[in-house]
Amino acid sequence: MPAPDIANAPRMDAYWMPFTANRQFKAAPRLLVRAEGMFYTAEDGHEVLDGTAGLWCVNAGHGRHRIAEAVRHQLATLDFAPAFQMGHPIAFEFAERLAAIAPAGLDRVFFTNSGSESVDTALKIALAYQRAIGQGTRTRLIGRERGYHGVGFGGMSVGGIGNNRRAFGAQLPGVDHLRHTHDLSRNAFVRGQPEHGAELADDLERLVALHGADTIAAVIVEPVAGSTGVLIPPKHYLERLRALCSRHGILLIFDEVITGFGRMGTPFATGYFGVAPDLVTTAKGLTNGTVPMGAVFTSRAVHDALMIGPSGAIELFHGYTYSGHPLACAAGLATLDIYAEEGLLTRAASIEAQWHAALHGLRDARHVIDIRTIGLIAGIELEPRQTAPGARAYELFVDCFDKGLLVRVTGDIVALSPPLIVETSHIDRMVATLRAALARLE
Ligand SMILES: Cc1ncc(COP(=O)(O)O)c(C=O)c1O
């Protein structure tokens, strides 16, 4: 590999990087310059195994020519079409294709450009739905502690990660949170769903008693919480939450931005858990990370309730300039073709047991206080340093990168979510790199 061209390296001052320690990063940057299959190439030429599917989004692996071709062709054919009171054919085609694989019963699709926009869209649809069916007092939105639903004001407000909220004022009014389900004292080192904690769903009864069911429009949860560090729902928890929402006329939204499109070994986590929400938010995986896009899936009951008024009336005053963007739809259609032809939406099911076994092999590694795995997801929780929470996992992340493995860290939790094309050799390499890095770590 040629040496990096330091003289011509771009200055780094202008780019304000997202969710990044900007000053620390710019002092010692980690730059990726190419990607193919399971690997990135860093700027200095070293290969980095992608243990995180980019940011949980490159489910079919990198550098898929079919997607590149589809986008190139679309760009040369129809680069943009307005989305309001106008359309273009492949937006409809893509929605139909998505409806065919949608979580059971959720075959109406609203396009957005990100997970954050999908969440805000779903929350707004829930509010509009309640109003349309004569339940206009239901304006309250319920999230869950440690939940991550993106960075819009809606998603931030229902989200439950302190650092993501603290600097940003009073948030949306009328939002409350269920307790989170993390309980290491009862559920450490579990493969799949933990035994204990279904009763935590009953926390919704507390909020119903406090606020009144007739004030609550919707509950939003991640079926598997990713960004907070992989929290897997206890057995029967989601079923209980579903039953409580139904009993109280509350819509249930599953935020499947990370679990959608095969991460669990089923197309969506709703299928994995056998629990049917009223709306599902998606984004990552929709276009294999190539062109920003999100999609909200709703039931016909929700959709049809809003198809009211004179036929010339706009039913939902909501949407984005780039909703159903032609390039995103082209990328998405090619992505669905790849998923179908390579069986990727269900492939994780065939390697889940191997994944569990390999990752849980790190149980005796230094600093590890928990390992949790489900689908093609793993969370490895480290004992935090007394005086510097998060430092240990961050050092591990940097060391792994230097040694050729990309992991993701949140606090002192390492998260893994490789592309769904991962092979045994890659899994072995991930585990070996992590084991060596953990042994070196102070
Ligand atoms: C569950 C969940 N919801 C929403 C989002 C926000 O997605 P985006 O960063 O595309 O806005 C994320 C991103 O990680 C997520 O994990």
Image (spheres, helix red, strand yellow):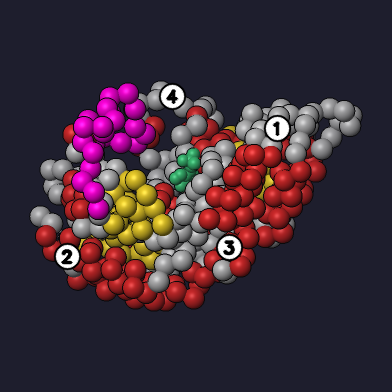
Secondary structure state at the residue bearing disc 2: helix
Of pointers 4 and 3, the one earlier in the residue sequence: 4
Mark 2 vs mark 3, foreground winner is: 3
Find out whether residue 12 is within the magenta segment: yes
The mark nearer the N terminus, 1 or 2, is: 1
Instruction: Name the amino acid type tagged 3.
Output: Tyr
For image coordinates 47% across by 64% down, the residue present is 420
Q: Which residues are magenta?
A: 1-25
- Of circles 4 and 2, the one toward us is 2
Residue drawn at 64 percent across, 39 percent down:
76
Left or right: 268 in relation to 306: left
Secondary element type, mark 3: helix
Closer to us: mark 4 or mark 3? 3
Callout 2 amino acid: Ala
Q: Which residue is mark 1?
A: 81
Which comes before the other along the chain, label 2 or label 3? 3
Q: Is residue 417 above or below residue 249?
A: below
Any part of residue 67 in sight = yes
Horizontal arrangement in the rendering, residue 49 relative to residue 154 (left or right): left
What residue sits right under mark 4 in the picture?
A: 170
**Residue underneath mark 3:** 339
| Residue 27 drawn at (x, y percent) | 18, 34
Residue type of the residue flagged with mark 4: Ala
Return the residue at label 2.
436
Marks 1 and 2, how far apart at CA: 51 Å
Measure how far apart labels 2 and 3 are at the Cα level.
34 Å
Q: First in sequence: mark 3 or mark 1?
A: 1
Element carrying mark 4: loop
Picture layout, residue 41 above or below residue 80? below
Q: CA distance from mark 1 to mark 4?
A: 38 Å
Q: Are marks 1 and 4 in contact (CB under 8 Å)?
A: no
Q: What residue is shown at x 55% (from left), y 50% (from top)?
A: 68
